[in-house]
Amino acid sequence: MHFELTDEQNMIIETVRSFLEKEIYPYENEVERTGEVPKELGLEIAKKCKDIGFFAANFPENVGGAGLNHLEFTLLERELGRGSNGLTVFFGRPSGILMACNEEQKEKYLLPAVRGEKFDALAMTEPGAGSDVRGMQCSATKDGDDWVVNGTKHFISHANIADFVIVFIATGEESTEKGTKKKISCFLVDRGTKGFEIAKGYNSISHKGYQNCILRFENCRLPQSQILGEVHKGFDIANEWLYATRLTVAATSVGRARRAFELTLPHLTQREQFGQQIGKFQGVSFQAADMITEIDAADLLTLSAAWKLDNQLPANREIASAKLYATEMLARVTDTCIQLHGGMGLMDDLPFARFWKDSRVERIWDGTSEIQRHIISRELLRPLGG
């Protein structure tokens, strides 16, 4: 692995960071206060993202994307992590799973998503089935050439702005050595489909303006043509395309932690107590040393996992390690930044309380820390017969 970034990679970092400073940061406080992003503002961010050539940067050039590799896209996501999710969601990154579309679906879903004409959302989690995906109750039964769907999904990020949703649904059962398990299929469901409702979700303390939604299916009839991939093969698609979401969480956690650290460091030389800068106290300076060490470690873990993907090397454990360490690192760093600012660290005048609240969900979504530890330990022990 080469640690020196190319001129093009540095350009990605500089361009995206400049974009955030001009187009995202000025609106963060208002979004945090209201919990809403005006539709016009979101569309304006998307337009400006297209103007600089970074919309759908995670898609190959042959479908109209910017064609960034995994490492380059991870650098982009790392920079976006510095900003409010409610705003950066409009910096278009459609779900990579859309690359599984057939030719007809490409025209209806993939290409409009890449062009920014349609927004997508991904739905897997249910009230009774979070980490236990095989336990999902939302089901579809075959009726002639159609599938009839009933059930509920929740915690579906940014479904409020989605024109269609990529939904994983149980379509049967199979017997395994560990008992009966659900067969899962993946469906493309348009907003406005009869029997399909996108409802307002819960009031989360993390990522104000980045809405979670509840999806309800009541005798929702979907034609066979709405299945993404093959029937009962939803997990195959998920395993091929959704690993990147864990890498994204790791990268954005690194970006947010580094922004919090960069805003805190000058404070250690400007704030004085007992006649000297607080950074001169060993108890404070050592905390700064610990923070930057953890941030850099998480950064290198994340970039290393992306590099492995680009070189067609196994990276499942490495991605899980990056997601686990980066999200837990972010929690420690944001907490320390608040501590070093004292009481002001918890005030809305500074962004640290927001960073701190936002950090909490990172250890839960896209696979909890416990799930990441399971993945890591399984990868270590299975080759030895464990």
Image (tube, rainbow, N blue to C red):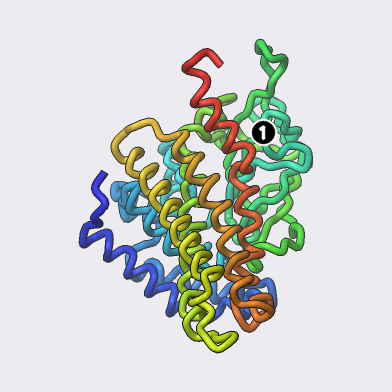
Location of residue 204 with respect to 368 vertically, above or below? below
> Label 1, on which residue?
133
Residue 6 in sight: yes
Location of residue 105 with respect to 46 vertically, above or below? above
Location of residue 104 with respect to 117 vertically, above or below? above
Quadrant of residue 29 within the rendered picture: bottom right
Residue positioned most to the bottom: 275
Residue positioned most to the left: 7
Residue drawn at 69 percent across, 51 percent down: 155
Residue drawn at 66 percent across, 64 percent down: 357
Residue 99, how many percent across, how many down? 42, 41
The one of 221 and 378 positioned closer to us in this rendering: 378
Q: What element carries label 1?
A: helix
Location of residue 118 with respect to 42 vertically, above or below? above
From the viewer's perspective, tell me whether residue 294 is left or right of residue 178: left
From the viewer's perspective, tell me whether residue 148 is left or right of residue 320: right
Q: What residue type is labelled 1?
A: Val
The one of 214 and 352 positioned closer to us in this rendering: 352
The one of 94 and 299 positioned closer to us in this rendering: 299
Residue drawn at 47 percent across, 17 percent down: 383
Quadrant of residue 8 within the rendered picture: bottom left
Residue 108 in sight: no
Residue 280, how many percent across, how many down? 49, 77
The one of 84 and 39 positioned closer to us in this rendering: 84
From the viewer's perspective, tell me whether residue 218 is left or right of residue 269: right
- Quadrant assignment for the C terminus: top right
